[in-house]
Amino acid sequence: MTSMRSLHGSRSGPVLNKLGFSTFIKPELAIVTLIGMVIAMLIIPLPPRLIDFLIGLNIALALLIFLSSLYVNDLIQFSTFPAVLLISTLFRLALSISTSRLILLDGYAGEVVSTFGQFVIGGSLAVGVVIFFIVTIVQFIVITKGSERVAEVCARFSLDGMPGKQMSIDGDLKANTLTSEQATAKRKRLEQESQLFGSMDGAMRFVKGDAIAGLLIILVNFVGGILIAQHSYGLSFSEALDIYTMLTIGDGLVAQIPALLISIGAGFVVTRVNDDNKNLGASIVLQLFSNTFVMGGACVMIFIVGLLPGFPLVVFGSLAAMLGLIMLIKRDGKFKSQLVTGLQRAGLMRTDEEIKAEKEAQEKTEEQAEGQLFPETIPVMLVMAQQTYQWLNQPEHMAWFRQAFFLEFGIPLPRTELLAKEGVVEGTVKLLIHEIDVDHVQVLQGQHRILSIEQLPLLESLEIPATRLERTPPQFWCHEEHASQLAQLNIQTRNSREEIYRLMSRGLSRLVNEYFGIQDTKEMLDKIDSKAPELMKEVYRNATVQRISEIFQRLISEGISLRNNKIILETIAQHAGKEKDNLALTELVRGRLARYISNKYQHRGLIRCVMMTQGVEEEIRRNIKTSGSGTSFNMEPGQMEEIFSLFSSAIAETAFAADELVIMCSMDIRRFVKKLLENKFTDLDVLSWQEISDHSQLQILATV
């Protein structure tokens, strides 16, 4: 009877030896240690104190798995769930074997088992047995069986749907909807989902088997314990029944409650439907209370139930009031705003101003941190004196600049900053691109610049005063009130704002590659793709984004707008596969834009031009070299000076400014002539004969 001391008297067991754990434990070593401990538990008898600790560990692990399954946003985030199920099931079975060993040998399995048994029985053996069997039946028949079936169906549907999903990914990849990296990630995710559902199907069978094993272990503990107590310790049947019923129920509950939590968690995982990265709790609340009509109907029905004889009206009325309050909050935005305002006044909720101020402070901090780590130059800056700054720094001026730039080039104006700086001459505006000086212009506020210098004698005869600015060549300005009079005389003028914009457009077109690149081209093409997907499919089939970007840059650099993007992209789609030279492909695009280009350079219905003779064109061709790396142009300095002299004389002969003339030449040398002349004659444009539409009229003023 000495060994049965724990049945009646002291329940003290061996003192648990202190275990030393390393401060840093690798996760894989922890799992290996747990598996080793499970195997040891099947063989080595454990003291009751250690059993109590392991039971607590089992409950904590079950709670952790349960909450993780509830708050997981995506199934892939808990891809180890099948392995976790297997390990927890083995650990629970090994723990049940250890507690059964203590129950059958000593009639005592630790404080936790005894406390669970006494708490559930609560003075009535029959009630304890009934409650225990209810918990066991709910877990085995309802939760485990349902989860097993759902996992089986999910695994089957996942396997059957794999070919279709793979074909969908391949189709998106061919249509350039996905990049190769995105397609690889989607395939990897699809494979992980398939493996996860397949593993879950098998893991749920472990859970079902664990429930069956738990029932058998309980039966063995109950029958075996009574028999051992009667034959080995001489206890009566009633004493043995009382003791081993308590221990069996306690042991069964400490095994079944964690198993129930894990089974519910497994049910959450296999029945989870991905919903915009919301966890299960958030999805249930949002969907359950989304329909105010349903909540209103439920509110009325619950209140009616409370009015029936014998039903507690307070309980059902409170529930109806809660549903009605939620319905009002969902339906009435004014009520919700009043409620929020009341909470804010009570200090229970932050005000909108506080939230906005905190957000702005956070964004400012992030911008400062980003600026310190990745300092970026300002794309466009206009530097001027204080008085000019006050005049130009008006919203209507910047809006006009943005609109004019888009109309001329077909792309948005880069971020532009105005800066007032001491030391700048009043009326001078400097253009900086990425904070480096490009050019400057002198303007007179309230005056117009006269472009037709040859008409100055007419102004003197009309007694219209003109202000002369000493520039090269000289500039003449007249007051704004005379602009309309000059326009009636067909004398062209530009006001101060237009003169500043011309400074910007010339500099930005010449240095387009510094602010418009591959990313900007891709964003533009994405917008076009939403409206013309078939066109973009053909374009991408024949040209890369980098090649399209280079063509766009070449067009903008010579003042050709991208607004007529349909013709540009169709030409690229038709010829990019055959023509590998980007320079030649750009010329083909310009040829398709002949009507637009001709209209751009017309003055009073005529295109004023200087025509190159056959001899000069042949001289240019002799200096064009073609190699494997492309086509290049090399001319001796002496020849270049001779060419410059010819063009200077021809332009002077026309009596027009360079920006009112164009040079006409053959298509094959046009880009090289432009390259040759652009540094010497920055305002002089070069056109080929293919860029002149049939309805345009040329006015040949000189030949070279």
Image: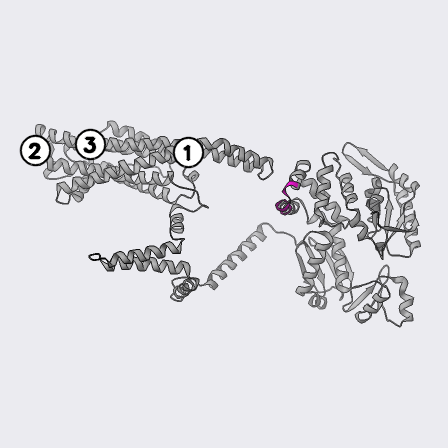
Q: Is residue 13 visible?
A: no
Q: Please report whichever mark, 1 or 2, sits nearer to the chain's N-terminal start.
A: 1
- Circle 3 residue: 100
Q: Residue at x 48, y 36 (%)?
A: 189
Asked if residue 528 is among those painted magenta in the image, a careful observer would answer yes
In the image, residue 49 lies at what x, y percent? 21, 38
Q: How many residues crowd around disc 2 within 10 Å: few (fewer than 14), some, or many (20 or more)? A: few
Instruction: Answer with left or right where residue 6 lies relative to residue 84.
Output: left
Q: Please report whichever mark, 1 or 3, sits nearer to the chain's N-terminal start.
A: 3
Find numbered disc 3 in the image and state the secondary structure of the residue it sits on.
Answer: helix
Find numbered disc 1 in the image and state the secondary structure of the residue it sits on.
Answer: helix
User: Magenta: predominant secondary structure element?
Assistant: helix
The part of the chain drawn in magenta is 527-534
Q: How many residues crowd around disc 3 within 10 Å: few (fewer than 14), some, or many (20 or more)? A: many
- Circle 1 residue: 196
Which kind of residue does numbered mark 3 sit on?
A: Ser
In the image, residue 581 lies at what x, y percent? 76, 36
- Circle 2 residue: 237
Which kind of residue does numbered mark 2 sit on?
A: Phe
State the CA–CA distance, disc 1 to disc 3.
Answer: 34 Å
In the image, residue 218 lies at what x, y percent? 19, 33
202 or 308: which is nearer to us? Answer: 308
431 or 335: which is nearer to us? Answer: 335
Instruction: Answer with left or right where residue 509 lies relative to residue 351.
Output: right
The mark closer to the camera, 1 or 3, is: 1
600 or 441: which is nearer to us? Answer: 600
State the CA–CA distance, disc 1 to disc 2.
Answer: 51 Å
